[in-house]
Amino acid sequence: MRFICASFGGACMKILYGIQGTGNGHITRARVMASCFKELGIDVDYVFSGRPEKDYFDMQDFADYKTFRGLSFSTKNGQVKSYQTLKNARVCKLVNDIKSFNVKKYDFVLNDFEPISAWAAKRAGVPVVGISHQAAFLSNSVPMFGRGLFRKSLIKHYAPASTYLGVHWQPFADNIIPPFIANHDHGNPVAVMNKVLVYLPFENLDNIIDYLKDFPEKEFYCYHPHAQDKSLGHIHLRTPSRAGFLNDLANTSGVIGNAGFELASEALKLGKKLLLKPLDGQFEQDANAQTLRAMKMAHVMNYLNPQALDDWNSAPQNKQINFPSDPAPLVKWLLNKQWHDTHSLHKDLWGNVNLKA
């Protein structure tokens, strides 16, 4: 891992960025931040946890990043398996990684729901700025749909921070900012009306194929961790690829996915309609799905429901929401260390977002 000295306003600063590696949403947000850090000439050390090192892909934006095993949840057929999650936690390994990770050389830690860097910094007395969608749920203004006190405690103890910035689709509170969605150049951004992008990584692939086979009028482009590039009639399986995924997202008519925050945010910026099947037992995804349904931005199903897909096929497109693409105001706010003042940052970032229909 490279040792970093970031210069800003004449000060030499060392920054660590801890990123949750379960799923791809946190990494998507980190890519936007990494691009801005690089453009501004700010070097940052990156650390990831939550999946095996071999399962990370398209990580060029993060140079010599470091990985830990960390914590993740175990799933089967679209459900979180609590017993297996606890069984796989390996708490002793987690504690040893936290104790052995020396973060004292950093001025502060930027943290996107990554537990090892957060707890290592807490032990060392290094400030942590937590920026994540999960942090938004610490605000009483954000809908959580039940068991709020327990879930807030879980969020605070999973990746503790000195300052929290939540990321959400609505400006619920002063410490909540919109998602940053990078602008991408696409060869063909015009929507193909019978093309549907499918990303259900926690579902069994055979179950997904069986679900989609009865809709031959649609061309489904299905990305999945266990897929190989091949076509089964109107179902086109794709291995994970960031570039390929973004190109297919650009000209799809709609997205079928779990209710992760970042994919939904990317789809909303492009005006793609959404059919969501939240991961059963994962409260964040359930809250996301219910929030988007309340915003009239998504159809929601609790299982791979053919009737839900049939109804959704005839639904209109969403309006585009112009979430910001440039996180420079956030980066400068971070480096100025005026972390108590979230109001001005909130006002700046939400000022031009067109939330009204």
Image (tube, grey):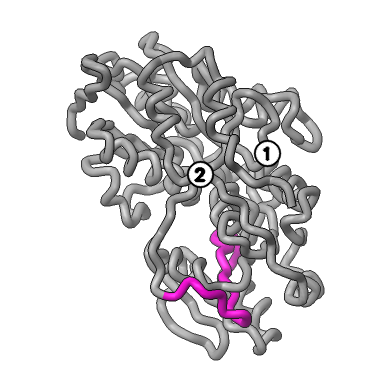
| Magenta residue check for 326 | no
Overall secondary structure of the magenta stretch? loop
User: Secondary structure under badge 2?
Assistant: loop
Decide: is 313 above or below 74.
below
Separation (CA) of disc 1 from disc 2: 13 Å
Please name the residue that numbered disc 2 is placed on. Answer: 324
Task: Count how many numbered circles sit on residues in the image.
Answer: 2
Residue at the (44%, 48%) spot, across then down: 28
Q: Which of marks 1 and 2 is nearer the N terminus?
A: 1
- The amino acid type found where label 2 is placed reads Pro
Q: Which residue lies furthest to the top in this view?
A: 125
- Rendered image quadrant of residue 85: top right
Q: Residue furthest front?
A: 352
Q: Nearer the viewer, residue 179 or 216?
A: 179
Q: Where is residue 92 in the image (x, y as percent from the top left)?
A: 43, 27
User: Secondary structure under badge 1?
Assistant: loop
Residue at the (39%, 29%) spot, across then down: 331
Decide: is 287 above or below 210.
above
Residue 190 is tagged as: none
Residue 170 is tagged as: 1
Q: Nearer the viewer, residue 98 or 86?
A: 98
Q: In this view, does 205 lie to the left or right of 117?
A: right
Decide: is 176 above or below 254.
above
Q: Where is residue 141 in the image (x, y as percent from the top left)?
A: 75, 27
| Magenta residue check for 202 | yes
Magenta span covers which residues?
Answer: 188-204
Q: In this view, does 253 lie to the left or right of 25?
A: right
Decide: is 259 above or below 301.
above
